Amino acid sequence: MTKRANKSFTEIEIRVIEPSDISAMGTVIRTVMTEFGAVGEGFSIQDPEVDDMCESYAGHRARYFVAIADGVLLGGAGFAQLQGAQPWTCELRKMYLLAESRGLGLGRRLLQLCLEQAAEFSYTECYLETLGHMDKALGLYAKYGFEPLAGPLGRTGHHGCDTWLLKKL
């Protein structure tokens, strides 16, 4: 039985993903993507990295962070170089929060941490792909200065996404 997150957490830890987090983070990703109808071919729910997040973000210019409270993994976010793009472009990847943990400022904290770390790793721009009906996420990205693009960058394989954004770091 999975513990459910709630809005009464007093302390939420954000840290780099560990092997013991992989299963729970995979469950978060699959739960949230299903909630938003992002299932099937062309969505990141199919990415092999969902089952091995530690290995996928072990590169010298990549990180994945998780948010945990009271032993419950609430969500996470990461970044890595955007495949098929210039070496100064990273991609914000797999930023998902369980529904019951939204509204706590976790999205803002995770996004800020990813952007700061990406800049420290000498990235000068951050790209992301999402869905146009993920209104709250789009609002957060706009607050952080992400600008809409006419089409996708790189080679993510996520042709199910319909919204592409870029931010200068």
Image (cartoon, rainbow, N blue to C red):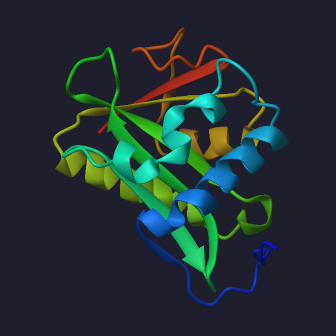
Residue 45 in view here: yes
* Among the 4 quarters of the image, the one containing residue 112: bottom left
Task: Tell me which residue sits at (71%, 45%) in the image.
Answer: 30
Q: Quadrant of residue 3?
A: bottom right
Q: Nearer the viewer, residue 58 or 132?
A: 58
Q: As displayed, is residue 144 above or below residue 81? A: below
> Is residue 159 found left or right of 153 in the rendered image?
right
Say which residue appears at 82% left-offset and 74% top-offset.
1
User: Residue pushed farthest top?
Assistant: 150
Q: Is residue 145 left or right of residue 9?
A: left
Find residue 147 and report its horizontal and vertical position in percent. 49, 27
Q: Nearer the viewer, residue 50 or 153?
A: 50
Image coordinates of residue 151 in percent, x first then y, are 53, 9
Image mark count: 0
Q: Quadrant of the C terminus?
A: top left
Occupied quadrant, residue 100: bottom right
Instruction: Out of 75 and 18, give the one closest to the viewer.
Output: 18
